[in-house]
Amino acid sequence: MNIRPFKRVLVANRGEIAVRIIRGCHERGLTAVAVYSTADADALHVRMADQAVCIGPPASSESYLLGDRLLAVAAETGCDAVHPGYGFLSENAGFAKKVIDAGLVWIGPPPDAIDAMGSKTAARQKMSAAGVPVVPGTLEAIHDPAEALTIGREIGFPLMLKAAAGGGGKGMRLVHREADLKDALLGAQGEAQKSFGDASVYLERAIVNPRHIEIQVLADAHGNVVHLFERDCSIQRRHQKVVEEAPCPILPASTREAMAGAAVRAAKAVDYVGAGTCEFLLGDDGEFFFLEMNTRLQVEHPITEMISGIDLLQAQLRVAGGEPLWFRQEDLQIRGHAIECRIYAEDARANFRPAPGPLHVYREPGGPWVRVDSGVVQGMEIPIHYDPMVAKLVVWGATRDEAIGRAKRALQDYRVVGTPTSIPFFLATFEDPRFLAGHYTTGFITPEWLDANLEPPDATVDLAVAAAAIARLESELGRKAPAAEGAISSAWKRTGRWREAARGWR
Amino acid sequence: MRYEVELEGRKVVVDVERAEGGWRVRMDEGEWAAWGGGFVQPGELRLVNGGRSTTVGTHVHGDRVALQVDGHPLDARVVDPRSASAAMGGGAAEGVLATPMPGVVVRIPVAVGDRVTAGQVVIVVEAMKMENEFKAPVDGVVESIEVQIGQALEANAVLARIGE
């Protein structure tokens, strides 16, 4: 690891996180170099950087994922550090090693820590050895029903049978009773053989209706490790988080302490440096289990920043530059409550089908304690090649109720026309009694709930009919919204005119 | 001005005129109602009616009006009944199903000539690791199916056309 001060950072990412990193660099007096694919030539992160280099065509595999090309750009542009953001190469230990071997500072954990947490077997073993509870189970294949029964009784029902070579929900069986185990095993093995060519099936205890709770950790290169409390990320669709809140509304202080303690032990066990997150499943009986550790900054980090007062990106930059943490665990406190909504360009009524498109009208909400992390501006087209994130809307309130009220108001003020977004989904969620009571699990979003809650009410459609006619009339009468036609060129024309006018004033 | 507004399966004849403080509007030749408001900025329209005031997003392009109302993204077709496009019996654009992203056609549960209702699944495309259902936007008849099962599609490929 090269841990020493640096001045110029290669931002190896795009979209809102690249913007976040560039802002963070500028706040420390560092310069930032952006990279972009041809699809992102007009992107916000490109315009904000001190220098920007095109690295290839739209496909990530031909641009943002090409580690060697990124290193070449870092060398050409005089960078002495690389920040990988999240996704892409952020958890690629090989890339981290190459950055370090090239003499640059890697703004992330040591490659060995990335490796240690990247392998399921290795991570479970390390965590068990460190006294961190993992989902009870085995990673060896089960060969026959008798063995399954013996092990199953040890682990505890309900059981999840999982294909060792598997994924995508195939070769998985949930077994509630001993009597069902034999048939379930045969079924799972058969499916696993058909889907993956490998009938190996292993056992885990099934955590029923879990909550997904994660703990933020931060470590410096001098052995100090702290936690910054938890985030509840249970509201998910297609196993992707869409709403996150901090702190978890129903977590007893003792459980928080136990989980946070486990997370800190996990970080220490792999000699972690930097910002990381330990993910846990919390069962409805209050038991929790380590799921995995993410060795990078996470999408939802802003809610932790809001309740702790610690800027995690600044912390990453300072730690990578060799500074020790400037606070101790005792200095940290949970203050108030924060909620994040991930605004995606998708059609919530069509099962959240991605619907990237033009932002003919785009205005982010403002107001106190309303934060929007985005990489878009009005007039842009959301590219189809990457995940369809528009922005993260993050609000803070002195209490959870205040935060919810603020989130609703901000969502109502969030103006987007041209691309459908998940905004109606969030508005419905913040009316739901289960959410308001803080009692929800990863099973919150169901097709039935979506059908029942996402249709626009009659009053909304009535208003829309009138609005459509009025808008059309106004467009014809010439009190025309410039955004009505040629949005992309118009936005720049207007900016150009203002610059001309400003020159004229001198 | 008189317009025929189609939105969310409704068809409404709307008369709208500028008036003091905003506009007056009537639906299907009912009572005139006063609507106040104005553009906050291009694309953002404040509307006041019946004691409720709210801001909606609008984007007009020809006879299509894209809206955001109470957070909901809605698309309207607003036709001047005197215009040529109305005379042609409706925009082809209305009944055209197209995919915004590349994918592969996996199912076509209807055939040319079938009567379909608004919301009925016409084509299923696999993209971004999920099955995406494309549904008839209006009641009508499947005029054409432009793709076949197994076909790899580019973004904005036309899938099918639904006619009156």
Image: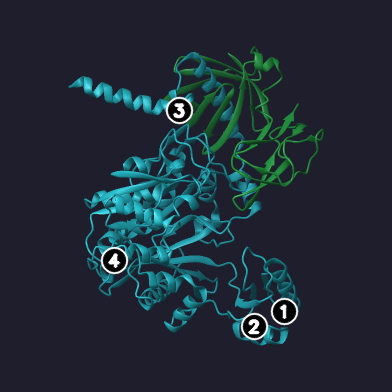
Chain colours: A cyan, B green
Q: Give percent across and percent down for residue A255.
A: 43, 74
Q: Which mark is residue B146?
A: none
| Residue labelled with disc 2 | A152
What's the amino acid at mark 2? Gly
Closer to us: A441 or A482: A482
Quote the CA–CA distance across marks 4 and 3: 46 Å
| Residue labelled with disc 3 | A487
Q: What residue do we see at 64% from left, 36% from top?
A: B157
Q: Which mark is residue A181?
A: 1
Q: Give percent across and percent down for residue A64.
A: 44, 52
Q: What residue do we see at 32% from left, 66% from top?
A: A101
What's the amino acid at mark 1? Leu
Kindly state the secondary structure of the residue where label 2 is placed.
Answer: helix
- Is residue A306 toward the left or the right of residue A188 in the image? left
Quote the CA–CA distance across marks 2 and 3: 61 Å
- N-terminal of the pair, mark 3 or mark 1, is 1
Q: Are marks 1 and 2 in contact (CB under 8 Å)?
A: yes
* Label 4 vs label 1, nearer the camera: 1
* Label 4 vs label 2, nearer the camera: 2
Q: What residue do we see at 27% from left, 64% from top?
A: A319
| Residue labelled with disc 4 | A332
What's the amino acid at mark 4? Leu
- N-terminal of the pair, mark 2 or mark 3, is 2
Query: Quick check: B81 above or below B158?
Result: above
For the N terminus of chain B, the image quarter is top right
